[in-house]
Amino acid sequence: MRGLSAPALMVLASFLFATMSVCVKLASELYGTAEIVFYRGMVGAVVLFLVARRQGGTLRTAVPAMHFWRSVSGVFALGLWFYAIGNLPLATAMTLNYMSSVWMALFLIGGAVMLGTSKVDGRLVATVLLGFIGVALILRPTIEQNQLWHGLIGLMSGVLAATAYLQVTALGRAGEPVYRIVFYFSLGGMLLGLVTTLASGGLTTHTTWQGPALLLAVGVLATVAQMMMTRAYGVGRPLVNASLQYLGIAFSFIYGALLFHDKITWMAVLGMCFIVASGLGATLLRSRTAFKDTTTPTES
């Protein structure tokens, strides 16, 4: 991994996240969303525990409350995203979750207006409006297919993901290493997923090898992709990384068409393009302000 350039890491990470979403969609036919979150968190926690041990790091933290709230928002974002993947065309679910960059720009605008600390950048407002036009175009076909609820769930996953990214920024400024942040996020997913699963009827009995294989793939692909993306953001240029991250939508589009025969309308494709342009514009403008976004836009 260390021998790869940042662009190569981002392309691979985007491909692995898209592949993970395929596994989530297939697994959703056999398991509930909370159960998939549980297994994804369990695999991630085990892998990150081993990584910490190998690097000689410690999982002891001086800011447990910050990890708790980051885990809560991140896990709920992840659960909503997995639910959307199971019920929407793959590229649509991926795009709505990638609205997180636009939501963060909206948070910036709202904070500036409420605190009166700085002048609102009109270009930032324009990028947000472009993003919401893209959302409207994407949700229009879902209304016709009686999938509006699922579309709104996917949109909400992006809102919570944006909140989680801002909390990751705060944790980074508090001196928390990436492996510790991701470990507690995975641990939170494992615990919340397990509690929710037990409350709704218990764990599913595995009758074939396909189910466990899909669950293992979700956890491994998500964890490896997250580590690759973290490494890329650590050594590469943020705007280049953000641009390549959106390849995940293209990969999901191809997967959806080939494997699930998803019907993507011209309106939805145009909406995806608007959201990608909006997200890149918001990333560029944020990087030029005093507010430095040091988050790594990973899974959640």
Image (cartoon, helix red, strand yellow):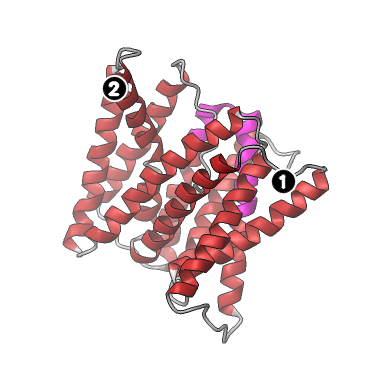
Magenta run includes residue 233: yes
Residue 292, compared with residue 31, is above or below; it is: above
Question: What's the residue at 32%, 18% (across, down)?
Answer: 115
Relative to the observer, which residue lies in front, 169 or 124? 169
Looking at the image, can residue 216 be seen? Answer: yes
Residue 200, compared with residue 136, is above or below; it is: below
Residue farthest to the left, as pictured: 144
Relative to the observer, which residue lies in front, 184 or 83? 184
Left or right of 288, for residue 208 = right
The numbered mark, 1 or 2, whose residue comes first in the sequence reads: 1
Which SS does the magenta portion mostly show?
Answer: helix
Q: CA distance from mark 1 to mark 2?
A: 37 Å
Q: Position of residue 4 (x, y in %)?
A: 71, 39
Left or right of 5, for residue 35 = left
Q: Quadrant of the N terminus?
A: top right
Disc 1 packing (10 Å; few <14; some 14–19; many ≥20): some
The quadrant in which residue 150 appears is bottom left
* Residue 59 numbered mark, or none: 1
Q: Position of residue 57 (x, y in %)?
A: 78, 42
Question: What's the residue at 50%, 67% (across, down)?
Answer: 195
Q: Position of residue 227 (x, y in %)?
A: 65, 45
The magenta region covers 223-242
Q: Secondary structure at mark 1?
A: loop
Q: Secondary structure at mark 2?
A: helix
Residue farthest to the bottom, as pictured: 207
Question: What's the residue at 54%, 47% (across, down)?
Answer: 68
Q: Position of residue 103 (x, y in %)?
A: 35, 36
Question: What's the residue at 27%, 18% (across, down)?
Answer: 122
Residue 261, compared with residue 249, is above or below; it is: below
Magenta run includes residue 73: no
* Residue 114 numbered mark, or none: 2
Q: Label 1 sits on what residue type?
A: Leu
